[in-house]
Amino acid sequence: MSLIFGLVKYDDDKIDESLLQAMYKPLKDFPQVRYDKISTHEASFGKILNYGTPEDMFDSQPVYLSEHNRLFTAQGRIDNRDELAKVLGMNAHDTVSDSYFILQAYLKYGEEVQHKLKGEWSLAVYNYNTKELFLARDTQGYTVLYFYKTDKYFSFSTSLKSILSLPVFKKELNEEYFVSALNLWKVREKFASNETFYKNVFYLQGGCLLKFKNREFTIKQYWPPENIRETYYKNKQDYADEMSDLIYKAVDRRLRSYKPVASMLSGGLDSSMVSYIAADLLKKHNKTLTTYSHVPLYKQALLNDPMAQKRVLDETPFIEATVRASGNINSQYLYSERISPVQGSSESLDVLDGFIHGAGNAYWLTDIYKTCAQQSYGTLLTGEGGNGSTSFSAIDYRQAHSIRRFIRNPINYLRRQVAKPLVLKYFSTVSVFNTFEKSIKAGYTNARILDRYQIMKDVRNKNEGFLPYYHHVLESKKNFMTYYHLRSVLGASFGNYYGIELRDPTTDIDVMNFFLTIPNDVFFDDNFNNRMLVKRMMRNKMPDEVLFARKKGLQSSDLIFRVRNSKEELLNELSGLKNSSLVMDYIDMDKLENNLRMYLDNDSMQTTDSVHLVIKTMQAARFLQKNF
């Protein structure tokens, strides 16, 4: 996907063009077709063009609109081109770029344009008459807009690296955000706050727009709408049929790509559904879908893993079942044997300029992205948002009470619809139930930091936890969207860095608008089995062993064996991190070292989650050491 960035200066009549060049400098080695820029008086915009869709070949932005006295640039993919073409009077539009559609839609609808665009996009407009900057982005795509304000100018970019490279940028740690990301304290609040790891650097979340004028900015959320009414159909299958139609259209829209399309395929519901549908649609054009699947390298060692009783540690059989059912998938299995967890963590830190909760998965994600780009694919389909749409698990205790369900399974009924809501609402602060409190204690945040923010007291008093109590299913749906904002940021950053576009049909605007109206009960059957929407949608298409698997898969299931194989590399890394006084101030490195050595040397002294936490904490420490 293309990148856009720019600056608006407050006082001087003409902006210093070297500032825009400084923003471009860290991006010049990114995959790109060309770089264009315009500087007019106090505003300067730049755009790095990549061919995401075939029509991007005709892109010619940024542009100064002399008739309107505005500077404009945009990037992205517009999915309702045909619909817009009729409204905008653009009859022959095969040689019209998607950014031109955004421009024409803006000229017609002004600052209501965000309601007319479907797809994954972002735009920037500076009005010289009113001295106002207008920024907007799509609802939930792999897009992001960062912004940073100084006493002399306001800057924005679809890459954080541009902001960090400004010559007057002062790099300061956003301490509370860092602590929150480190141990997940206040995580929902922080994810909803537009903050980043860097003080005074923010990002515009999905479904939002920003206006900047008179040295002040305001952010407005335009999606999702406030008043959402549930849709009631006679049969639950009717919801599945409508969603099936929407998801097929969403996948089809994302097959419009300048380079060939590939897909991520695990054994889970969402990636399997997306890959199956994409392969089905490509079959009509005599094309085969290539899929990338990360699978364990140490398969034999996993045979005796006690976790196998609860989780699927090797999803290869599920992947193969989907491939057979499709008949149009060229599956590639990646063992990621050439990239260690340390290397994956380090490279993702370079990409993101921040650490991530799933740092233990970075090695195989990096492997997939790099392989996809090296094999000349331009688009990579995902199903990351499926947990918040097609395969939503819903809230078991918020189902309508049913005598039939009680008679059918009284114990399950009492446990899920009576005991569970009571515990979550009234007793989750009690230590025996407060898994979040236990998680923080098991982590590596330095005791001084825990005391500084009174984190343990806050967790107990505010009923903070991994499983919040929901009064209505819509709360849960919107909560997922809050978390997904970060996924969109990460996906955009990885895509820009490796020169591929990540596209997720499960967060398509039409899919999401319908999903928000679906009642809670639709996602269940009478036996409390959940995720039933996708199971009804894909019944007799996807294989039953995938749709109705009793156990979930486990990502990075052989992580401990990969870590042990990288013992020397890990310990060397750890030794270097302990030399940083800043790292030692935030992280209990002695505790981390003791646990790591136990995990490396003792088979019975670890779980996959505990090893993930070590990798994440080491990445956080490396982030501190590298940047501050």
Image (cartoon, rainbow, N blue to C red):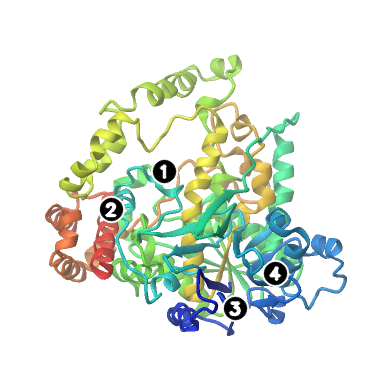
Quarter of the figure with residue 262: bottom right
| Image side of residue 601 versus residue 511, left or right | left
Location of mark 1 (residue)? 189
Can you tell which mark lies on residue 50?
3
Q: Is residue 282 above or below residue 232?
A: below
Query: Label 1 sits on what residue type?
Result: Glu
Of badges 4 and 1, nearer the viewer stands 1
Q: Nearer the viewer, residue 350 or 215?
A: 215
Q: Tag count in the figure?
A: 4
Of badges 3 and 2, nearer the viewer stands 3
Residue at 56%, 55% in the rendered image: 383
> Distance from label 4 to label 3 (Cα)?
14 Å
Can you tell which mark lies on residue 580?
none
Mark sitting earlier along the chain (2/1): 1
> Distance from label 1 to label 3 (Cα)?
35 Å
- Say which element carries label 1: helix
Location of mark 2 (residue)? 613
Of badges 4 and 3, nearer the viewer stands 3
Kindly indicate whether the residue at mark 1 contacts the one at mark 4 (C-beta within 8 angstroms). Answer: no
Q: Is residue 424 above or below residue 605?
A: above
| Image side of residue 223 versus residue 312, left or right | right
The location of residue 80, given as percent across then percent down, is 75, 60
Mark sitting earlier along the chain (4/2): 4
Kindly indicate whether the residue at mark 2 contacts the one at mark 4 (C-beta within 8 angstroms). Answer: no
Mark sitting earlier along the chain (4/3): 3
Query: Label 4 sits on what residue type?
Result: Arg
For label 1, the crowd category at 10 Å Cα-Cα, with few meaning under 14, some 14 to 19 and many 20 or more, is: few
Query: Label 2 sits on what residue type?
Result: Leu
